[in-house]
Amino acid sequence: MRIWSYFIIKKEVKMKKSFLIAVSCVLFSVWGCSMVQGGEGHLKGREIVEKGEAVTIKGTLKENGEEWAVVAGDKTYNVHFGKEDYREEQGVKLEEGKAVTIEGKIVGNDVAVCVLNMDGKTTRFRKKDGRPMWAGRGHGKGGKGEGKGKGKGEKGGCGESDCDK
């Protein structure tokens, strides 16, 4: 009887180890996939500007909780305006259903806004080199003149045709 108990206990321990290894593999795989798939969904505006392609989107604003999107035809784009304080200083009041034209950079369904046209008013959010208009104004870490530029501006940026109108 003792021998059977030993084998049963050993088999249970082995099964528990196998189960823990399997669960660990599944959790690691899920985490890895979420990093790959969700990575672009969580890009910041500066990353979109650096990696993205120039785009002009005409559509209507849609509120997504704390975020904003633009619906253009059958596509919905996540819109990255940047600092809310800057929007408010510029008098930009976002309202669901408002018609907008956005010039910016796009990666997947994420758009970093360079220029917003709404209600007959044009508001610039990014400079030609892609830096936000609010950068270097002494807000937060770094302060005026201590930002990280792109040097010659060869890669990234909003470009003259995208933002400098």
Image (tube, rainbow, N blue to C red):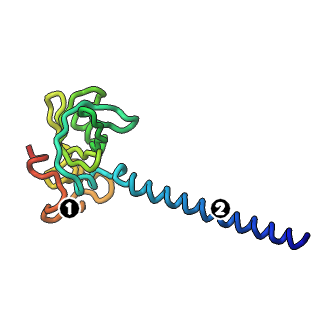
Report the residue that reaches farthest toward the right.
1
Q: Residue at x 36, y 50 (%)?
A: 42
Element class at badge 1 = loop
Residue 67 is situated, as x and y percent measured from the top left of the image, at: 36, 38
Mark nearer the N terminus (2 vs 1):
2
**Disc 1 target residue:** 149
Which disc number belongs to residue 109? none
Residue 143 is situated, as x and y percent measured from the top left of the image, at: 27, 57
Q: Taking the image as drawn, is residue 35 in sight?
A: yes
Q: Residue at x 28, y 48 (%)?
A: 108
Residue 83 is situated, as x and y percent measured from the top left of the image, at: 30, 44
Position of the C terminus by quadrant: top left
Q: Amino acid at mark 1?
A: Gly
In the image, 47 versus 77, the foreground residue is 77
Q: In the displayed structure, would residue 151 be above or below residue 90?
A: below
Mark closer to the observer (2, 1)? 2
Report the residue that reaches farthest toward the bottom.
3
How far apart marks 2 and 1 lie (CA) works out to: 50 Å
Res 97 → quadrant: top left
Q: In the displayed structure, would residue 58 be above or below residue 21?
A: above
Q: Residue at x 54, y 58 (%)?
A: 27
121 vs 16, left or right, is left
**Disc 2 target residue:** 19
Q: Taking the image as drawn, is residue 136 in sight?
A: no
Position of the N terminus by quadrant: bottom right
Res 118 → quadrant: top left
Residue 22 is situated, as x and y percent measured from the top left of the image, at: 60, 62
Q: Amino acid at mark 2?
A: Phe
In the image, 37 versus 49, the foreground residue is 37
- Count of all numbered marks drawn on residues in the image: 2
